[in-house]
Image (spheres, helix red, strand yellow):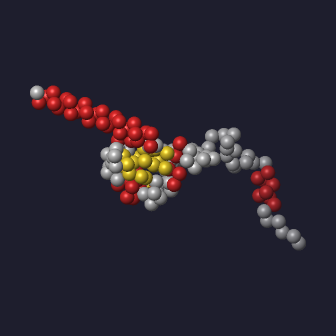
Amino acid sequence: MIRLPLLSTVIKNLFKKPATNPFPKTEPVPVPENFRGKIVYNVDKCVGCRMCVTVCPAGVFVYLPEIRKVALWTGRCVFCKQCVDVCPTGALQMSDEFLLASYDKYDSKFIYVTPEEAEEIKKKQEELKKAKAQAKAKKSQ
Ligand code: SF4
Ligand code: SF4
């Protein structure tokens, strides 16, 4: 005699709703708290301590000595969160963003602080330095 132990389960399930999320027709499944998504870098908060460069296992960071900031190519990131934990100023955070597919591995969405942006930061820092020196000179007059 042929045994079909799963037959009743199969028939029952034929009349149930599919237990799938038909993304992209719907929103993706919500991420949990403390989800490790794409790294976010706040260049203004960065003090150039280089701790992130030291701990990152994937070589995401390049230190920019002229401006005491870091440049990131997050295309290499393995989402380990070590840089976020070690950063003393909170300049690095993990976002909820996980839809990161791209045709271009050097897509601008993966890069923080391009050479042009570094140049702008340098100019701003020099202007600030000048303004501070002038204010100091005025005070001592
Ligand atoms: S999360 Fe990990 S791999 Fe990604 S940038 Fe930070 S330290 Fe590097
Ligand atoms: S650890 Fe934070 S403050 Fe230090 S260089 Fe990296 S981003 Fe900047």
Q: Residue at x 49, y 45 (%)?
A: 111
Q: Nearer the viewer, residue 127 or 22?
A: 127
Residue 55 image position (x, y, % from top left)? 39, 58
Quadrant occupied by the C terminus: top left
Q: Residue furthest right?
A: 1
Q: Is residue 85 visible?
A: no
Asked whether residue 59 appears in the rendered view, the answer is yes
The x and y percentages for residue 33 are 48, 47
Asked if residue 109 is positioned above or below residue 13 in the image, the reply reads: above
Look at the picture and state if 140 lies above or below 65. above
Residue 139: x %, y % from top left: 14, 28
The residue under the point 58% across, 46% down is 100
Q: Nearer the viewer, residue 134 or 51?
A: 134
Side of 52 where 17 appears, left or right? right
Would you identify the image quadrant in which residue 47 lies? top left
Question: Quadrant location of the N terminus?
Answer: bottom right
Outermost residue to the bottom: 1
Question: Quick one: 55 or 31, which is closer to the camera?
Answer: 55
Count of labels in the image: 0
Residue at position x 45%, y 39% from top?
116
Horizontal side of 141 relative to 78 (left or right) equals left
